[in-house]
Image (tube, rainbow, N blue to C red):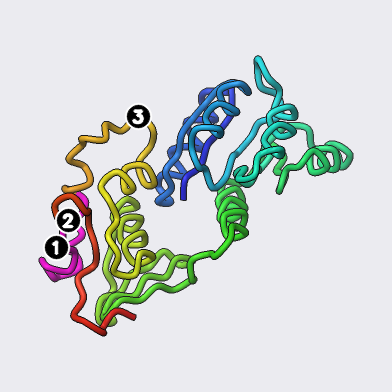
Amino acid sequence: MRVLVAEDHHVLARTIATGLRRQSMAVDLVVSGDEAERMCLGTDYDVLILDRDLPVMSGDEVCRRLRELRDAPRILMLTAAAEVMDKVYGLELGADDYLAKPFDFAELVARVRALARRAPKPSPAVLRHEGITLDRARREVHVDARPVSLTPKEFAVLQLLLEARGAHVTHQDLVRTIWDEHMDPRTSAVRATVSRLRGKLGAPDAITADTGLGYRLHSAPGLLR
């Protein structure tokens, strides 16, 4: 899942971003409305967490403009304006959800995930491949019924590979989807994460790397399910 946080309170913005990254989300940050619009025009985000009170361009105007796009992200307005009519107005502008400050972070995470599930063709709650089982809601992974502890990045990589159902996932797709915009596309972080993931899955050949194509889950013919 890729999320853009548009919030001009720097401490709050960093806190939100850090927390969402710990939930295996790729997060970018902007501090003004015009930056939020520019980023959404150039990047496919699943969810935009949008403060209404932004400099240069208000969050209301950002919401209004993005709703004119065919593939706009889901918009969660996050604002101190908590009156009922404020919420009604924000939703009428085109926001998909509205959360007033102060808020509980667990609720923010739940709302972001709920918005992402509204996208076309959502991924199943539980993904399986041979002996591997990944439960997206519970954030749990099992290999042959044995629980496996993964970091958020390892979990996100495995989820993306499972969703590909044996097809290749390129290095660029992994960087773009799981890391953020500041990550150097030539980084070795992907290779290192995949290497650790192989070790935790207990099968060095569980994930194959094919030059020029990317990574995929290894499977004998007919066994991918």
Q: Is residue 143 left or right of residue 19?
A: left
Image quadrant containing the C terminus: bottom left
Dots 2 and 1: beta carbons under 8 Å? yes
Is residue 202 found inside the magenta-colored segment of the image?
A: yes
Q: Which mark is residue 85?
A: none
Label at residue 199: 1
| Total numbered badges shown on the rendered structure | 3
- Residue 177 sits above or below residue 220 on the image: above
> Going 32% across and 50% down the picture, which residue do you hit?
153
- 133 relative to 84, above or below: below
Furthest-left residue in this view: 204
| Amino acid at the residue labelled 2 | Arg
Element carrying mark 3: loop
Residue carrying label 3: 182
Is residue 202 rendered to the left or right of residue 177? left
Q: CA distance from mark 2 to mark 1?
A: 5 Å
Q: Amino acid at mark 3?
A: His
| Secondary-structure class at tag 1 | helix
